[in-house]
Image (spheres, helix red, strand yellow):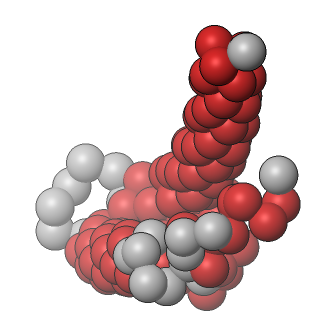
């Protein structure tokens, strides 16, 4: 009779561990998918065009002026085009670092409610 109780307790402990492992695996999978989405968004040029349309137009204008000036380095339009490209690139790099900082801040354990202990236990 005592061995049946021990076996039942072991089976219950085994089921509890399997549930905990399953919850943690789902939580890790959600975090991985969220990280992949953020990575795709961060590396997509389309997200920067949507976020900064003026900067994108400035960069396109700069490329157009630089290409229309040809290979001559003395032309004003080439100089202006390269200046616009440089300014747009600087703004793009600044936006990239701001986004990366925001993602870093959002990923901190205290800032994300789903990372708090017990949050996944309630959903499962």
Residue in view at x 16 percent, y 68 percent: 74
| Between 124 and 71, the one nearer to me in the picture | 124
Seen as rendered, the residue at the extreme front is 1
Is residue 33 shown to the viewer in this render?
Answer: no
Q: Residue at coordinates 63% horizontally, 13% vertically from top-left?
A: 3
Residue positioned most to the left: 73
Q: For the point 49% across and 85% down, which residue is it?
A: 111
86 to 1, vertically: above or below = below
State the residue lying farthest toward the right: 123
Where residue 69 sits in the image (x, y, percent)? 37, 60
Q: Residue drawn at (68%, 69%), measured in percent from left and top?
A: 119
Seen in the image, is 22 located left or right of residue 89? right
**Residue 88 to residue 10: above or below:** below
Residue 122 location, quadrant: bottom right
Residue 4 in view, yes or no? yes
Pick the front one: 41 or 68: 41
User: Above or below — where is 101 with respect to 6?
Assistant: below
The quadrant the N terminus occupies is top right
Q: Foreground: 25 or 15?
A: 15
Q: Is residue 113 left or right of residue 69?
A: right
Q: How many marks?
A: 0
Q: Position of residue 32 (x, y in %)?
A: 56, 43
Q: Where is residue 35 in the image (x, y as percent from the top left)?
A: 54, 51
């Amino acid at each position: 009779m005592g061995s049946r109780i021990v076996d039942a307790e072991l089976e219950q402990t085994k089921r509890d561990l399997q549930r905990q492992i399953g919850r943690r695996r789902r939580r890790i999978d959600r975090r991985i998918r969220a990280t992949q989405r953020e990575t795709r968004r961060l590396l997509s040029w389309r997200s920067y065009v949507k976020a900064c349309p003026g900067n994108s137009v400035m960069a396109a204008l700069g490329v157009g002026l630089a290409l229309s000036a040809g290979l001559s380095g003395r032309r004003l339009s080439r100089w202006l085009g390269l200046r616009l490209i440089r300014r747009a690139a600087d703004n793009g790099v600044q936006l990239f670092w701001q986004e990366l900082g925001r993602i870093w801040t959002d990923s901190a354990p205290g800032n994300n409610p789903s990372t708090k202990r017990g949050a996944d236990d309630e959903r499962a």
